[in-house]
């Protein structure tokens, strides 16, 4: 986090602190504490907060403080008290004990970096505050969005939801443990560490040291979890702060992170992952994961279309307690179709082989993640109504020993990401073999998500088709930040009488220029999917309303 002075806040867990008196004799018994770099009333401070509630915090002015090493895990911080002529008097000292040498090094490095910032960028203003530029994160993200985001991930119940996604957690564990050769003796940075589970995996795989960077209050829980596993925890340092702001004492050989959101890019953490790469990763270092792919295919789902459209029928009432609601019907109808649908669907609903957009995390620039403009082209395998575009993603852990994919494909074991569908308010009709073209345009916004613009068109079919031309086109605008979570219990996907069973469509992947990016487990398998059952009579009644 960043406070009013612009100082980049960081926290460090300490084994103990003890205050020294002016005579250098101990005046306070040793006690565990947390060291926090912060700023209050325009003064940049280093605050030592003892764990004991009865103990008062010890505040040190960073502008005048000095830090000296007494040993590998012991240091003393001295603060200036007054000045007599040319002589400076240091009136307060705090002895600090660290868990290990790595944490001592990280603390000293952060201390010196912040001192340099105060000396260079920060200048005293008439009102007593320090002037400093905002971090890149704060420039891009709306404060209210960031506050909610870090609050959400600071709660154990949400961490538990992710940990209990055994496809996710198990794949990460396998990718790390099966590639011990990549981790043994290496320095690892865990980007957005959360509960610290990936840091613990890296330590299990033999990492020399792991720096777990976490900006939310979950950092405190991570420290507790890591401390409760001392055989691993002695090689893990938890640093509370944003990746864009914290300083590390050494470069990393490996970055590990779980930066994926819905549709891979939601929450915009991929940008943080790339920033961590540029700031902390050694040249030719590894990233786990290193590649992501967004997969897209048109789908047909009459039940889902009617379910969404039916929500707006409330606004067709002309006598709702004496009020005509119909003036808002059109807006309500558009509003419901502006929500991407998040659920697990039957892969037999796909009407064409999928295509993919590849993101190489090791090469892409942060700015390239601000906008995606993906041209679409499919060939329909069946004749049907196309209701929109289905999307999912997978990521590759390109280890030296084992290449492992984590997929969220329909028909594969369900993850907490599910799949995502963009539903058109005006479906288009296609025949088997007919070409479907379009565009998926996604633009990042400051609420840590994307605005989606989708267009699908059906090209001319039959006699004269060789002359080209578009005969149908439908577009929609959606907000990835506001999805419709449609997670009912899986049921056999019943088919209406006028629906023909779609043959299972297998995904076709865009080739990647590496043999290592093979994905044998990616082909979707048949599986049941949720779906509300709507009778044909109800649907006919809906259609007669003029939509």
Image: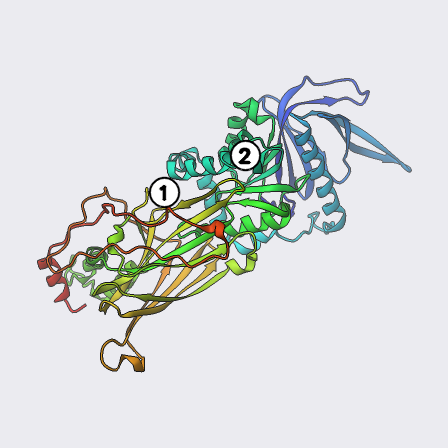
Residue nearer the viewer, 424 or 391: 391
Q: Position of residue 431 (x, y in %)?
A: 22, 69
Q: Is residue 281 visible?
A: yes
For marks 2 and 1, give the CA distance.
Answer: 27 Å
Relative placement, left or right, of 414 versus 74 is left
Relative placement, left or right, of 366 versus 388 is right
Residue nearer the viewer, 271 or 144: 271
Location of mark 1 (residue): 416
Instruction: Report the residue at 41% width, 49% height from top.
Output: 519
Are discs 2 and 1 less than 8 Å apart at CB?
no
Q: Is residue 165 visible?
A: no
Q: Earlier in the sequence, mark 2 or mark 1?
A: 2
Image quadrant in which you'd find residue 171: top left
Q: Most extreme residue toward the left, as rendered? A: 537
Q: Position of residue 78 (x, y in %)?
A: 77, 30
Location of mark 2 (residue): 180
Instruction: Report the residue at 15% width, 63% height from top.
Output: 318
Circle 1 Cα neighbour tier, 10 Å, few/some/many (<14 / 14–19 / ≥20):
some
Residue nearer the viewer, 3 or 467: 467
Q: Nearer the viewer, mark 2 or mark 1?
A: 2
In the image, residue 344 above or below residue 366? above
Determine the secondary structure under disc 2. helix
Image quadrant in which you'd find residue 335: bottom left
Q: Position of residue 232 (x, y in %)?
A: 56, 26
Instruction: Report the residue at 40% width, 34% height from top.
Output: 160
Circle 2 Cα neighbour tier, 10 Å, few/some/many (<14 / 14–19 / ≥20):
many
Q: Most extreme residue toward the front, as rendered? A: 515
Q: Position of residue 71 (x, y in %)?
A: 76, 24
Instruction: Report the residue at 38% width, 56% height from top.
Output: 295
């Amino acid at each position: 986090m960043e406070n009013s002075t612009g100082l980049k806040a960081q926290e460090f867990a300490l084994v103990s602190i003890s205050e020294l008196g002016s005579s250098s004799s101990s005046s306070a018994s040793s006690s565990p504490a947390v060291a926090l770099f912060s700023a209050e009333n325009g003064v940049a401070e280093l605050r030592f907060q003892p764990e004991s509630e009865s103990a008062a915090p010890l505040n040190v002015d960073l502008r005048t403080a000095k830090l000296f090493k007494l040993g590998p895990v012991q240091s003393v911080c001295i603060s200036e008290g007054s000045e007599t002529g040319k002589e400076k008097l240091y009136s307060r000292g705090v002895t600090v004990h660290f868990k290990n040498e790595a944490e001592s090094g990280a603390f000293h490095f952060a201390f010196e970096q912040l001192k340099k910032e105060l000396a260079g960028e920060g200048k005293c203003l008439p009102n007593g505050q320090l002037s400093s530029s905002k971090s890149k994160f704060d420039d891009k993200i709306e404060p209210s969005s960031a506050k909610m985001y870090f609050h959400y991930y600071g709660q154990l119940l949400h961490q538990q939801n992710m940990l209990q996604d055994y496809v996710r957690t198990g794949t990460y564990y396998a990718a790390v443990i099966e590639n011990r050769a990549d981790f043994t003796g290496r320095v690892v940075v865990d980007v957005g560490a959360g509960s610290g589970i990936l840091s613990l995996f890296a330590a299990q795989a033999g990492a020399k040291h792991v720096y777990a960077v976490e900006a939310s209050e979950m950092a405190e829980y991570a420290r507790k979890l890591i401390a409760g596993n001392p055989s691993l925890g002695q090689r893990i340092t938890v640093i509370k702060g944003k990746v864009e702001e914290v300083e590390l004492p050494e470069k990393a050989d490996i970055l590990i992170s779980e930066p994926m959101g819905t549709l891979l890019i939601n929450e915009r953490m991929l940008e943080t992952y790339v920033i961590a790469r540029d700031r902390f990763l050694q040249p030719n270092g590894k990233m786990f994961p290193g590649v992501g792919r967004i997969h897209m295919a048109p789908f047909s789902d009459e039940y889902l279309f009617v379910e969404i459209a039916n929500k707006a029928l409330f606004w067709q009432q002309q006598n709702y307690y004496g009020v005509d609601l119909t003036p808002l019907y059109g807006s309500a109808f558009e509003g419901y179709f502006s929500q991407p649908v998040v659920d697990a669907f039957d892969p037999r609903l796909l009407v064409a082989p999928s295509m993919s957009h590849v993101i190489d995390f090791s090469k892409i620039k942060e700015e390239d993640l601000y906008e995606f403009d993906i041209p679409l082209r499919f060939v329909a395998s069946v004749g049907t109504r196309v209701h929109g575009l289905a999307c999912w993603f997978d990521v590759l852990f390109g280890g030296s020993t084992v290449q492992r994919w984590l997929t969220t494909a329909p028909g594969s074991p369900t993850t907490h990401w599910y799949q995502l569908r963009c539903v058109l308010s005006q479906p288009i009709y296609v025949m088997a073999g007919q070409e479907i073209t379009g565009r998926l345009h996604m633009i990042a916004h400051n609420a840590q998500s994307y605005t989606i613009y989708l267009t699908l068109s059906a090209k001319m079919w039959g006699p004269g088709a060789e002359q080209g031309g578009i005969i149908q086109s439908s577009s929609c605008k959606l907000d990835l930040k506001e999805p419709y979570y449609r997670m009912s219990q899986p049921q056999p996907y019943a088919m209406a009488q006028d629906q023909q069973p779609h043959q299972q469509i297998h995904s076709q992947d865009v080739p990647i220029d590496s043999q290592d990016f093979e994905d044998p487990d990616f082909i979707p398998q048949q599986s049941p999917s949720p779906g509300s059952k709507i009778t044909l009579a109800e649907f006919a009644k809906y259609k007669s309303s003029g939509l």
